[in-house]
Amino acid sequence: MAQAISDNGLAEYYHNRTSLPGQGHEVLPETLKKLVLYDHPEIQHSFVIDVGEHAREAVLILEGITCAACVWLNERHIKQLPGVRSVEVNYASHRARVSWDTREIALSRILQEIQLLGYNAHPYSALQADALRKTQRKKDLQRIAVAGIGAAQAMMLSVGLYAGNWYGIDPGTVVLLRWFGLLLTVPVVTFSAMPFYRAAWSGIKSGHLNMDVPVALAIITAFIGSVWVTLFGGEHVYYDTIGMFTLFLLGTRMLEAGARGKSVESAENLLKLQPAMATRLRGGEGGEQEYVPVMDLLAGDWLLSKPGETLAADACVVAGESSVDEALLTGESRPVLKRPGDNVIAGSVNLEGPLTLRVTGVGESTVLAGIVRLVDKAQAEKPPLAQVADRVASWFTLALLAFTVLVGALWFWFDRSQTLDIVLAVLVVTCPCALSLAVPAALAAAGSHLIKRGILVTRGHALETLAKVNHVVFDKTGTLTLGKPQVVDTRLFAQTTLTRCQMLASSLEQASEHPLAAAFARIATTPLLAVMEARNHPGQGVSGAIDGVQYTLGNQAFSAHSRSIPSADLEARYPGATLVWLCDEQCALAVFVLADPLRTEAADAIAGLKACGIAVSILSGDAPNTVRHVGGLLGVDAVYSEQKPQDKLARLQALQRQGAVVAMVGDGVNDAPVLAGAQVSFAMGSGSDVANQSSDIVLLSSRLTDVQQALESGRATLSVMRQNLFWAVAYNLLALPFAAMGYVTPWVAALGMSISSMVVVLNALRLR
Amino acid sequence: MNATLVFLLGLSVIFLLLMVFGIFWAIKSNQFEDMEGPAQRILMDEDDPMLPSNQLSDKHK
């Protein structure tokens, strides 16, 4: 951001700012002053989106979030500020999506409130998030290293002390070993365990008990108790327990952060595909070239993209022709040909020739940023199971603390010497970490696994619902088929060659903008011929002269020569196909059969679903015989043709009334309502934006077999979530009585607690 | 007996400090940033003829 500030020549602004407007009476720390900069429109440009006249939306990164409770605290606090319309904090990415009214509140005020809570908020930009994560990770590693070394050494000393208990030991040596234990544990307590105190403190301050409260209490109690014993003599010191507890807890959190980080990074990596600089053409095509930061680009700018470069912005091709690689976006490794008039997406790579581009979208309004936001949204919408776990964990902590006090009081009454041991064991063994981690860990792991395969889960509940799906409904055009007509067969009538006919047809169609013309552009293998007197005959075809001969290309009625040829057999063989006839001045030369071919993997995908016992049906707006033909090829009996969008929705609701849990797969605008109506929906990545918006899962690579992949993944995720929740609850309920009765020593408790959390995280990581 | 113990424990503290120092240095110099890369990298030969720079030098030979 500092870079952005100086880039925009705003360093001056920063120097001149000494107080916040309207807040002058309050002396604010230096850090708070900096926040005002974020109100400047020039800077907001890169991370704030206008969602209405006075409504703005931004994504903020929150620093210092350690658990679900912190998320809850931030959400609740920001929501109650006047002028804030909505706020959603994403636990996985530590990002908050805030929308506010500019008339009532400024962004800096929101940031300031977050700081007052004890967290740090930064407007989101991919680079900054990355640097933040790196420093956080380094700090965590340092804490783990100190805790590990401290724990290992304290344990060595403990071995000496335990052995001494057994074989007898010189009291002076005991004191010596205890003092060294203290020395080794001080860094663990003051440095490694820091995050627990901080999280616990902010929890207490907000009146919301989080699981860090018992953790911090356990560490501090154990330490003070041990220091007391070291100074004044007593039964036990717990330096080894403190070290181990801290080490295991930090280790589990690191693992969990790793799993979350992966899912966040895969989404963010999409954003980082955009380069930092671009070549702008000043004053339009052929203008002077200048090298500018991508941040400065505006819609309407002219860009020059050289071969090998990554595209900086969404744009429309103005001149030049090249293939681009959109693999990172769609998972499709085949290069896509781009011609003037085509749209290119930021993050794709220009492979062959220079392209002159006109920018249509930059920064937050690119397709790429849109995808990242979709993921963000999905992760912020917590599934019902996760919400339950959150609530339970917070009640659980309260009940636990009350229980600990009760147990402590009872033991203090009956057997004073054991009190510290028991209280520690109860606090440590029942830490509800595993419970809080159970669902988010599973979702994060599954999400990151799926996005690598080109399956983008855009709504949180989708994975849970997927597991219950027993009926998959496909749209036909664009979903089961490619959605673009292609020449599937050619029949020759005269003394001519296939190549010549193809060349003639392509040449005749080159000026046409008819959708069918695109199919002919694809079959040309040789350079096109020049066409004289090219004419378009709407509803019939095209005509023109090549090398002095008049040709026509169009439907059967267009030319007298083609009218006499019977075509019933072709029509029977290719139901729904379009026949296009090529004739010269004397006779018909050839007929091209244009049809919308099935996706190659469609049959496999449907066979796979049926093998899993899932019912399949097709809903299409197409004519009955075409749909039935496709159904026959794929082995689907339940086909419904001539369905308007509302018919589709009605059909779907009828299925749902019969008890089916329906997954809908579609691509077009006409599928949007039915996609929204289905319990869970897939949109083809190549489909319309509306379809993508109203679906739960986007198949970025448009591979139909991914549907089954996603269903399987959903089942696996749900079973892992259930296992995790069951394990966490069972463990806590089982361990509590034993700890309260004094059968669990503090170090066993530390081990048990850590293992239970670790089991949950490792179980989630199995999802791959 | 205690004198030996104090000496040995003191020595262990010095070693511990060295360990902490070493690990902090490793963390600072980004050795934990990429846990998979180095394991893969060791399998790749620097004299791989597929590398463009090596193709050039082959021609010069």
Image (cartoon, rainbow, N blue to C red):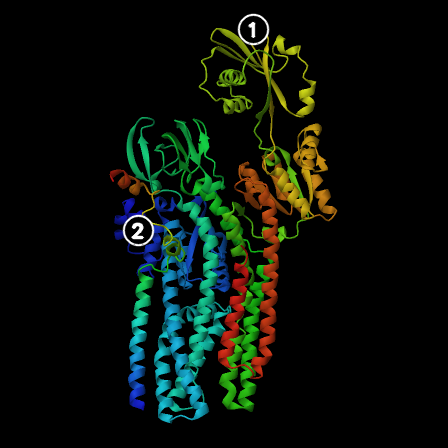
Amino acid type of the residue tagged 2 in the rendering: Ala
Q: Quadrant of residue A187?
A: bottom left
- Tell me: residue A262, above or below residue A246: above
Horizontal and vertical percent position of residue A160? 40, 85
Mark 2–mark 1 Cα distance, whole angstroms, equals: 72 Å
Nearer to us of marks 2 and 1 is: 1
* Label 1 sits on residue: A585
- Chain that bears disc 1: A
Q: Quadrant of residue A663?
A: top right
Going from N to C along the chain, the mark reached first, 2 or 1, is: 2
Name the residue located 38 percent from the left edge and 45 percent from the top edge: A46
Amino acid type of the residue tagged 1 in the rendering: Glu
Horizontal and vertical percent position of residue A48? 42, 46
Q: Secondary structure at mark 1?
A: loop
Name the residue located 52 percent from the left edge and 59 percent from the top edge: A765
Q: Residues within 10 Å of mark 1 (few under 14, many from 20)?
A: few
* Label 2 sits on residue: A2
Regarding residue A77, the answer to whether it shows in the image is yes
Q: Is residue A26 left or right of residue A258?
A: left
- Chain that bears disc 2: A
